[in-house]
Image (tube, rainbow, N blue to C red):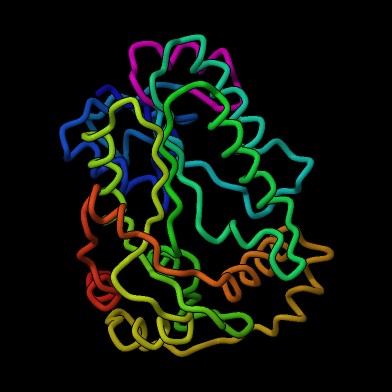
Amino acid sequence: MRILFIGATGMLGKPVATQLIAAGFDVTLLARDANKMEKFFPGIKIVQGDVFDKESLRKAFPGHDAVYLNLSINQSSKNKDPQTEREGIDNIIAVAKETGIKRLVYLSSLVHFYQGMNGFDWWAFRIKEEAIKKIKNSGIDYTIFYPSTFMETYPYQMIMGKRVGMMGKSLMPMWFIAAEDYGKQVARSFETAGSENKEYPVQGLYAYTFEEATRIFIENYSKNKLSIMRAPFGLVKFFGSFSPKMNYVWHICEALNKYPEKFESEITWHELGKPTITFADFTKSL
């Protein structure tokens, strides 16, 4: 299968693209900056393109069977700004229909299902809900993944110098998953994909609250001796009135702390393989 990969850099894109390449798929990477992408993936096919530019997609899509979408909300953006999971999804679906793409594979999230719970309403989660509806109504075969919290959140987003930043009280456990394990499941999904539409919850081996996970991370992290830095939730929420990034932070932390995640990955493990990486082993490998 010939796969066009959109969003191959960063916390989740690179590990998944790496697993698809390792599995032997014919992978092409879409990049706004081809030279930068070449540094991440030397020797891999790269095409210039931007999800906000339909003409560039029309040049990139032909010759591919499937498109993998690793898109996200820019934490410093506002609802009115162009969004990859709104205007970008519209362009991708339109061009996919024009060029005969057979399957769309989309990375969503479990926590976005917190939308509507406890009076919670956030434009970023509404965008994710609409993106799923658009893909399902596109008439193109699809696979949608709903992962729990990624272990990579700690080294990429929570370490600040020699401290681990936390906000609010983590009430619900999450089945932390390593991006490498998720990437292997994505590769397996391409190997087994027929014409069926598929939706997969993605969860790791064990569930922890942020407090429990942070203790494991600190105990197993070898680069520095870490301590916990707690940000007052109310203060971050207040600054969110003035700063789009702070507004994003308090909304996502509110959802992560309170979403009542349940284990629901039995079918995912049966069809795509059981994760193998524990949170302690992941941390030791950093």
Q: Position of residue 95 (x, y in %)?
A: 53, 15
Count of marks overlaid on the render? 0
Residue 107 versus residue 52: which sits nearer the camera?
Answer: 107
Residue at 60% x, 31% y is: 134
Horizontal side, residue 11 vs residue 1: left or right:
right
Q: Position of residue 66 (x, y in %)?
A: 36, 25
Horizontal side, residue 120 vs residue 216: left or right:
right
**Which of the 4 image quarters holds residue 51?**
top right
Residue at 63% x, 45% y is: 129
Horizontal side, residue 117 vs residue 49: left or right:
right
The span shown in magenta is 49-66
Q: Position of residue 72 (x, y in %)?
A: 55, 46
Residue 36 versus residue 78: which sits nearer the camera?
Answer: 78
Query: In this picture, is 91 found above or below 255?
Result: above
Residue 1 versus residue 272: which sits nearer the camera?
Answer: 272
**Which of the 4 image quarters holds residue 127?**
top right
Q: Position of residue 139 (x, y in %)?
A: 51, 21
Residue at 45% x, 66% y is: 153
Query: Is 179 contained in the magenta span?
Result: no
Horizontal side, residue 203 vs residue 249: left or right:
left
**Quarter of the picture holding the N terminus:** top left
**Which of the 4 image quarters holds residue 280?**
bottom left
**Quarter of the picture holding the C terminus:** bottom left
Residue at 24% x, 48% y is: 272
Residue 121 versus residue 9: which sits nearer the camera?
Answer: 121
Query: In this picture, is 76 found above or below 34?
Result: below
